[in-house]
Amino acid sequence: MLFRKETNCSFSEYLAAYRFKMAKKWLAETEMPVKDIAVRLQYNNSQNFIRSFRKQEGMTSGQYREARGTVKRA
């Protein structure tokens, strides 16, 4: 209750926002594989992470990274 009063959101909402903030930072600034990002953010598997990311951001993590120009080109 105190957490919600101080942050104006629940702990789970705060944690989800933090996870997406870190995911977007790593996707934009590193070449870390999506599966490693998912592990670091404590998702059970990368597919759950990708699904959650798409629901939140309107695009997959790969599309986000590509739009930011951080994908290695072959």
Image: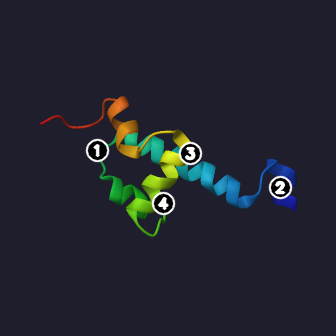
**Disc 3 residue type (three-letter):** Gln
Q: Quadrant of the C terminus?
A: top left
Q: Quadrant of residue 66?
A: top left
Bin the neighbour count of mark 2 within 10 Å (Cα to Cα): few under 14, some 14-19, many 20 and up: few
Tell me which residue sits at (59%, 50%) in the image. Answer: 18
Dot 1 corresponds to which residue? 31
The residue lying toward the viewer, choosing from 39 and 53, is 53
The reply to whether the C-beta atoms of the residues labelled 4 and 1 are less than 8 Å apart is no
Q: Position of residue 31 (x, y in %)?
A: 28, 44
Whether residue 69 sits left or right of residue 24 in the image: it is left
Tell me which residue sits at (40%, 37%) in the image. Answer: 64
The residue lying toward the viewer, choosing from 56 and 30, is 56
Q: Look at the numbered disc 3 and give the secondary structure of its residue.
A: helix
Q: Which numbered disc, 4 or 1, marks the residue that appears first in the sequence?
A: 1
Q: Look at the numbered disc 2 and give the secondary structure of its residue.
A: helix
Q: Position of residue 38 (x, y in %)?
A: 42, 59
- The alpha-carbon separation of the residues under discs 2 and 3 comes to 21 Å
Q: Quadrant of residue 40?
A: bottom left
Dot 2 corresponds to which residue? 4
- The alpha-carbon separation of the residues under discs 4 and 1 comes to 16 Å
